[in-house]
Amino acid sequence: MPLRLAVVFLLLFVSGCATSSTAPTVTSDTQPVSATILSTTSLAALTTIVLTSTSTTTAAVPTTSTLPPCSGTGHGPPEHIDILDNEQIWIATFDGKTLSDERLVAEGASVPDGLMIDGVLHLWWVQAADHTIHHGTLEDERFTDLGSIVVNGEIFAGMVDPDAVLLASGSIGLSVLDGFLRHGPPGPICYLLSADGQHFSTHRGLLDLPDRFDPSLVILDDQWWLAVGLAMEETPTTEIYLGSADGDFSWQATVDGAVPDLSYFEGQFRLLTCTPSGMRHYTSTDGVTWQSLDNVQLLGCDPSTVAGTNLLVYKKSAGMEPPLN
């Protein structure tokens, strides 16, 4: 069975910046809202910082294309996927430099993303037992798996890499890599909408380029910023695109590392990517020029900042050792 989730295991080599110059599109019903601050209290502190500092500067390359639909193929019945049995979801407090209060949330679960809604942490992830996206909550230290999300009235495998945004209307937008089980490259990046986080409808495709995966979306007024990982074995990278609710995306920048998490706070973007030497940490004021800060040693990958909080959720493989430098 093809398994694009395994692409994160290709992060064995990371070197210079590649560039790309193509892109596509998106839509939301309104703007995101900020959430309340939550800090965790639990287990031991983690990580050391590895020094590396460079800046990445690129010029925007405008691109236009027809808005892609979500995939009508590449879906299948729920089915156990054993490569994810060893995956775990973890949560920690992140101050921008180090992780602390790290604790295990769920077993046999991978590629998580989270939102704080009315003081309750909501999570979306891919479950090994059925290879579908699940939705759950973490409240008062108790984790509840609410089961597979329903998309257009159905439960199926073939959507992975969930990334959630909370909209001002109270709706939830979910970006996913769609068509995962089809022959050839999966895709496109698809945008779903939901009123409750459990029942979704496909809204439209965002980006339809081969080998782009793990979307991370930030909506600022009428600007839609989309980060996607590029699956390259020797030089995995992340591309940044700018679009709008109704228009196509244009490429803005490319940085080292893949499996991105894009967030925005205190007037600037923060981008986290995974490399063998730890989690890369970039900042930008314009989304085009990115400054590389100190790497953060992370015992895992697939970082996801919970908007409006100091929490980070991510995946680990049981028995995985941290990067040495």
Image: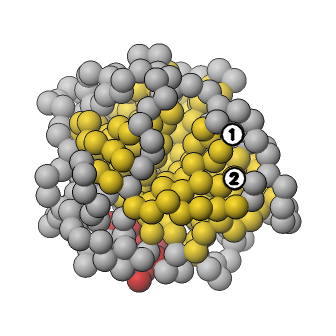
Q: Earlier in the sequence, mark 1 or mark 2?
A: 1
- At horizontal 49% and vertical 80% (from top left) the residue drawn is 85
Disc 1 + disc 2, Cβ < 8 Å: yes
| Residue denoted by label 1 | 119
Q: Which mark is residue 139?
A: 2
Q: Which mark is residue 292?
A: none
Image coordinates of residue 220 in percent, x first then y, are 49, 21
Is residue 137 or residue 218 the one in the foreground?
A: 137
Q: Quadrant of residue 43?
A: bottom right
Q: Quadrant of residue 156?
A: bottom left
Is residue 206 or residue 194 the one in the foreground?
A: 194
The kind of residue tagged 1 is Gly
Q: Is residue 195 left or right of residue 40?
A: left
In this rendering, the answer to whether 191 lies above or below 151 is above
- At horizontal 25% and vertical 26% (from top left) the residue drawn is 248
- At horizontal 75% and vertical 54% (from top left) the residue drawn is 140
Q: Split into 4 quadrants, where in the image is the N terminus? A: bottom left
Q: Split into 4 quadrants, where in the image is the C terminus? A: bottom right
Q: Secondary structure at mark 1?
A: loop
